[in-house]
Amino acid sequence: MESHDQTVARLRQLLDEGQFGEQGRMPPERDLAADLGVGRRSLRRALDVLEREGRIAREQGRGTFVRGPSLLTGLSLERISEHTSPPEVIELRLAIEPIAARLAAVRASACEIRKIQRLVEATRSAEGPDVYEQADAAFHRAVMEGAHNALYLAVFDAIVGSRGDAGWQRLSENGRCFKKQTVYADNHAEIAGAIAARDGERAAQLMHAHLRDVQGHIFQHAFALTLSAA
């Protein structure tokens, strides 16, 4: 039985090759698991990853659908993300996420706002750093979705996809620190509250302050790692 990472890689390859067709419906989980020779549980975990990456969309009662290719495919963002660093990524996030939060306060539907609020609770109640990281990525992506700007979302998906290796985990948003998780979950709640109140300026300010704190945390730990390696 192949590993979870191998299943994700095989599904990415099938999507890249257009095996399911653009905006096409993927086979039912039972059939897809049989075709890949993997268990249903492993397949669901792999689909969770692809959904967070924005490659697929799962609709209850309808099935799993392939999302269209990124608007930025021609720029080879996947290759760019392999050669970037946490400081570079947080600089880009500081440039786009406060604007996205402002737009979400204006454009997000009531359903999208409820999703953002649910993900606030997911970050607050996450047990363990890995669960928190997933909930955190989902929260920030939900804000990006609420902005209804496909270009911003494509960039966000590309850079968040580069956060999986061990080096990134050491420099991730909460630094695998429970105290930081609590602080940042509170930040998320304030951002969600401003979006729900349709206060775009406050949402942007809160997102900027939140990411500046994350930036300081990343720089502090990056400097410490550099010293320890010297």
Image: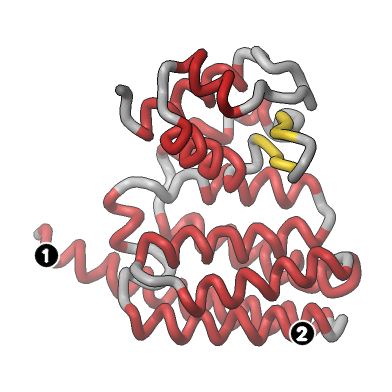
State the CA–CA distance, disc 1 to disc 2. 40 Å
Q: Residues within 10 Å of mark 1 (few under 14, many from 20)?
A: few
Image position of 60 with respect to 120: above or below:
above
> In the image shown, does 95 or 206 lie closer to the viewer?
206
Q: Residue at x 84, y 74 (%)?
A: 105
As helix, strand or loop, the secondary structure at mark 2 comes to: helix
User: Which residue type does callout 1 highlight?
Assistant: Ser
User: Badge 1 is on which residue?
Assistant: 228
User: Badge 2 is on which residue?
Assistant: 194
> In the image shown, does 110 or 191 lie closer to the viewer?
110
- On the picture, is 129 further left or further right than 28? left
The x and y percentages for residue 85 are: 40, 51
As helix, strand or loop, the secondary structure at mark 1 comes to: helix
Quarter of the figure that contains the N terminus: top left
Mark 1 or mark 2: whose residue is earlier in sequence = 2
Q: Residue at x 56, y 25 (%)?
A: 30
The x and y percentages for residue 57 are: 71, 40
